[in-house]
Image: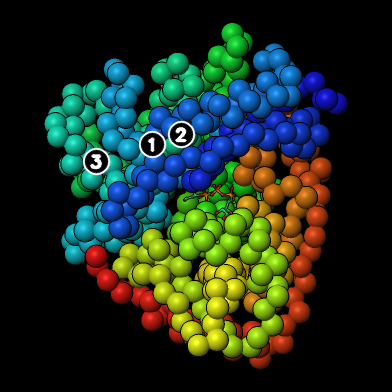
Amino acid sequence: MKSDEFIIALDQGTTNSRALLVNKNAKVEAIAKKEFKQIYPKPGWVEHDPLEILETQKEVLHRLIDKNNIHSTQIKAIGIANQRETTVLWNKNTGKPVYNAIVWQDKRTTSICEDLKKKQWQEYIKRTTGLPIDSYFSAPKIKWILDNVKGLREEAENGNILFGTIDTWLLWNLSGRNIHATDYSNASRTMLFDINNLTWDEKLLSVFQIPKSILPEIKQSSGFFGNIILNGIEIPVSGIAGDQQASLFGHGCLKKGMVKNTYGTGCFMVMNTGEKPIFSKSGLLTTIAWGLNGKIFYALEGSVFIAGAAIQWLRDDLGFIKSSGESEEIASSIKENNPVYVVPAFAGLGAPYWDMYSKGAIFGLTRGTGKNHIIKATLDSLAYQTKDVLEAMQIDASFQITSLKVDGGASSNNYLMQFQADILNATVVRPKTIELTALGAAFLAGLAIGFWKKSEFFENLETERVFVPDMADSKREYLYEGWQRSVTASMNWSKQ
Ligand SMILES: Nc1ncnc2c1ncn2[C@@H]1O[C@H](COP(=O)(O)OP(=O)(O)O)[C@@H](O)[C@H]1O
Ligand SMILES: O=P(O)(O)OC[C@H](O)CO
């Protein structure tokens, strides 16, 4: 091992818990990861077991340290990046979750959201929290758990229940059930947080009937959260951010107008908009990028709910491929001009459509369509959804995007990245490491303790490949027009 001091990043994603060892040169030296169970109790419902999340996260942390012969004294700080919005409520006396974690993709709270829309809360919620009303966010999930677990609201009112997004759940447990906190970026995904005044919003707490006592303290994304005891040594957790904001930071998108796109379970394009929130008229949400050095930075985000998850569906449910990576060769082998479209609206549609009732669909089937066409069309859908979001993001001449920085599991797919460049008519820039989420969390943690000086870690980020657009305008327009018709047809499909 060359380095002798490290930052560890815990990257708790929708499908994997990961721990990464980051050295002084800002390089990822080792990774340990473990997939965990996705629970689908009913159509549209998605849950995780909070204890399994905690156990897999601890397991990969210990495996990383043991396998690489790291002594706890070599770990200078820990940063956490997490799947956002996913909601856990637990009893603070027993430490036990009162219900499974309700995952960001879960659709069970559509009627709570519908009710809010009927009562005309859209304007207030957008202005206050930056968010559209959608079952994606934490507040309706908290309300659902409080309404549906017998006696829970009373327990919560008596001060026995805590709420957390996954960062908070991990921090509370890893700190010896001591610290109940989150950072600004995660707070901004709850639909309870006033992103202008930086406080929990009393009006929304009352609308959702959520007792304030269950909410965590909110801190800067880079700063001291608490200590974790690892093999008898105290290690500070000094960076926390939602995974997409962490990835924005990891890419070095520190200036207004800089943008990245992460292809994980979902696909999230995020643009730094500086120290003032900008409110989109075309379906993007306004969110907090991070709190750093006493300042708040804002971002515009296009959240696509199903991206890599659609490739997992091909693998695990349809059995069309044995591994996600196999999709690359299959898609590259199809040369026909008769496009099939898969609209993977398995969890409704996020940005820019925000349709909780859209359902997945396949269009353009002929007798000659085989499973390979469907594999290619599923990969293509990641690129089309990204184009939808990018179009929404070009709000004026100062936000023209001609180059897109990418990361996340599916960005390793060369077919997809080339098709992405073609359909956007923009270059796609892939860094040498696609673990930008983890790097972002590590950078936030390392900055807080002086492990790195301001921004020096970005100097070591290298580009691995640039994908240059190579498609005729007429073909691009023809293909995209077919996608737009397909999405439109899938919308408002069923309220079940
Ligand atoms: N070569 C590939 N081609 C397409 N999709 C891929 C490829 N490799 C991984 N994926 C997809 O990427 C996702 C995993 O990426 P990751 O960034 O780990 O996601 P998360 O953080 O959401 O758990 C999975 O949904 C998987 O299907
Ligand atoms: O698990 P990921 O990396 O797809 O990210 C999930 C998002 O944070 C949900 O908002």
Q: Are marks 1 and 2 in contact (CB under 8 Å)?
A: yes
Q: Which mark is residue 21?
A: none
Q: Are marks 3 and 2 in contact (CB under 8 Å)?
A: no
263 w.r.t. 495: above or below: above
Q: Amino acid at mark 2?
A: Ile
**Residue 43 seen anywhere in this rendered image of the structure:** yes
Residue depicted at 70% across the width and 75% down the height: 333
* Residue that carries the numbered disc 2 in the rendered image: 53
* Residue that carries the numbered disc 1 in the rendered image: 49
Residue depicted at 73% across the width and 24% down the height: 68
Q: Amino acid at mark 1?
A: Asp
Circle 1: is it few (<14), some (14-19), or many (20+) Cα within 10 Å?
Answer: some
Q: Nearer the viewer, mark 1 or mark 3?
A: 1
Q: Give the secondary structure at mark 2.
A: helix
Q: Amino acid at mark 3?
A: Ile
Real-space CA distance between mark 1 and mark 2, rounded to the nearest whole angstrom: 6 Å
Residue farthest toward the right in the current orientation of the protein: 2
Left or right: 27 as drawn, with respect to 294: right
